Amino acid sequence: MDETVAEYIRRTVLKIPRDEIKTMLRKWGFLSETQLQTINFHQNKDNISRDVVQLCEENSTSIKQAAVLDIIYNHSYPNKRTWSVYQMNKTEEETDFFDLTDFRKKFKRQLRSTLKNVTINFREYENNAIWIRIAWGTPYTKPNQYKTSYVVYHSQTPYAFISPSVLKSNLPLLCQALVVASNYQDIHEMELRSHSLNSLEDMVFKRYSQNFETYCPRPVQESTVAQETGLRVVQENINEKERILRVNREGFGDGPQPKLEFAEYKLETMFTSDPKLEVLDRKEPFRCMVKFHSPHLLESLKSLAPAGMADAPLSSLLTCIPHKARNYFKIREKKGFFPGSFVSP
Amino acid sequence: MEEGKAHPSEGVFAHLEMLEAQAHEVAVKQAAAEQRKEQLARLEARVQELRQRRDELQAKVELQEQGQHGQGGVVSDPAQHSAQTVLGWKIRKVKSTLQVFYLTGISGKLSKQGVCFCISTAYEGTYLDSYYLDLLTEPQVRIHRHSIPTFIPMEQIAKKYLQTDIRRFLSVLSDHLNAYVGRRYQADQLQEHFSDRLEGTMQRNSLCNLLVFNYNPSSKSETFPFNARLLYGDLCCSLPTEVVISCAPDAPAALTETAAAHSDLFRRLALHKAFGSFGSAGEHVDGAR
């Protein structure tokens, strides 16, 4: 077995938290159960990884097999990478019978036709998600297993979730291979980025809970406006509180919000002030960028109004984020009589 | 001595004045005390009065509540009673009508800016997912929000029918969704109940319109001689349009005959039901006739 492969396996095992190593090795399925029994998983990680490498030596692992372990690790911890969403278009409207073997063949062929030195791995998961791992080389060097791109593609959808490697120059090759393999015509990047892959999928596939008005509402969690104990306590502004909660629910929906870390608003609006002041001589748009950061942006926005920090209803610029599936916005002047602002599509 | 005469009279007068003042003070104090006593008595009487009134009102409220619950209330307004029961009956009737609409598969509710439709899907008696569509009606009919999966060709259907014939649009969309959940249900059932007859996991896709798997009709077997490829060409149909079952090239003739029989079976019967019919065929491979 190659030295590089051994080192790669060792480093991949070191990334995994100690309690998870056994389960992941089992999922990998490359080492037999008897071999796994010989490893002591209570020693420190350095020793565990060395034991694993030893066993892999006995089985003479190839780099492709080692790469599968990397996919399993990234599938369990996708939030360690940043994911961008790409959308593909096509004009023909024929029904697509997505054949997995066909897809894999086309993808590999297209990618290898431009760059031979790549390691490509596929792994399918139950929710029709196909994980593709690509390790990039150059025309003269072998693939660097530490500079990998990941693509998650759900069949028969126009969306792909890409976590690019540091080598940005390979991105066009990747996009082209994807377009050809999935029978689309072109691809462009959407203005949506986050660490949480599941949340991106939820937003784009409309899997988060939206509030639809129906006559037969789904069972809603009991509104926890806690009934204060003691009949002598009277909430003077309970009507206002309930209004705020209701309006907030209409804006954000009932269920958990998709997880985003930031939202960026670029303003290109005119500075509106008292015309007599004439702060700006030139009639130029006032350029400014507002960026919201949070470990969980949408949940924190949702809790602003009930906490009394903002008026309800919240601006539609904030509540439209999951619906429009974007967290980069450009706000320009509305052209017309009334200078206002509108969000560019 | 004159002073002496003057002083004693002053002294007497002063003393008398003093006594008068004292008496006055005492009288004033007494009057105040009496006034206070009177006020106290009045307030006590008022308290009694209010208590009595409170008790009366409380008794009235209790009687009213009892009357509503029908626990033998003595004083309950009979007209009010029946009006409430009628209202309750009407509400129940409306709720059940709405439930019926919901169960038919397509139900809707007018919203502030348009209509919100709910398409509820089912397959052979099992109710499956519900999908929502929020339409705006001004200035023209367009889709505002929805929860339709991305692999359903909704934009194409909308382009064809949304502006001209909403009913047709909803009906076609409902057909697509029902067929999709039907195909998915069959594939899930197969994977769940007959996994011992499948080799590994099935290959499928999001629309469940192409299924490829290796199988053996009998359950306790090591080999999976048949390879099935099911193509669902019609997205509004939950049965395959094309079934290709192949065996290894060196397979005996009996096997190829079975393959042909299975191919016909899968085209007619739901996938999990077809596999269910194998169970009665016995232990050997070429049993199903």
Image (cartoon, coloured by chain):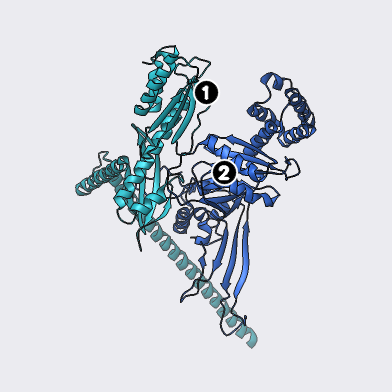
Kindly identify which numbered label has been placed on residue B199.
Answer: 1
Relative height, residue A44 to residue A161 (above, below) = above
Q: Left of A140 or right of it: where is B243?
A: left
Rate crowding at label 1 as few (under 14), some (14 to 19) or many (20 or more) other CA atoms within 10 Å.
some
Rate crowding at label 2 as few (under 14), some (14 to 19) or many (20 or more) other CA atoms within 10 Å.
some
Chain to which the residue tagged by mark 1 belongs: B
Location of residue B18 (image quadrant)? bottom right
Q: Tell me which residue sits at (55%, 66%) in the image.
A: A331
Taking depth in this image into account, of B241 and B275 the one nearest to the observer is: B241
Residue B135 seen in render:
yes
Q: Left of A243 or right of it: where is A30?
A: right
Chain to which the residue tagged by mark 2 belongs: A
Location of residue A109 (image quadrant)? top right
Question: The chain drawn blue is chain what?
Answer: A
Amino acid type, label 2: Asn
Amino acid type, label 1: Glu
Q: Which residue is mark 2?
A: A198
Measured from the top left, where is residue B99 in percent x and y? 30, 42
Q: Left of A75 or right of it: where is B80?
A: left
Which secondary structure lies at badge 2? helix
Measured from the top left, where is residue A76 in percent x and y? 63, 37
Q: Tell me which residue sits at (70%, 49%) in the image.
A: A167
CA separation in Å, label 2 and label 1:
30 Å
User: Which image quadrant: the C terminus of chain B?
Assistant: top left
Kindly identify which numbered label has been placed on residue A184.
Answer: none
Measured from the top left, where is residue A24 in percent x and y? 66, 30
Color of chain B here?
A: cyan
Residue A256 seen in render:
no
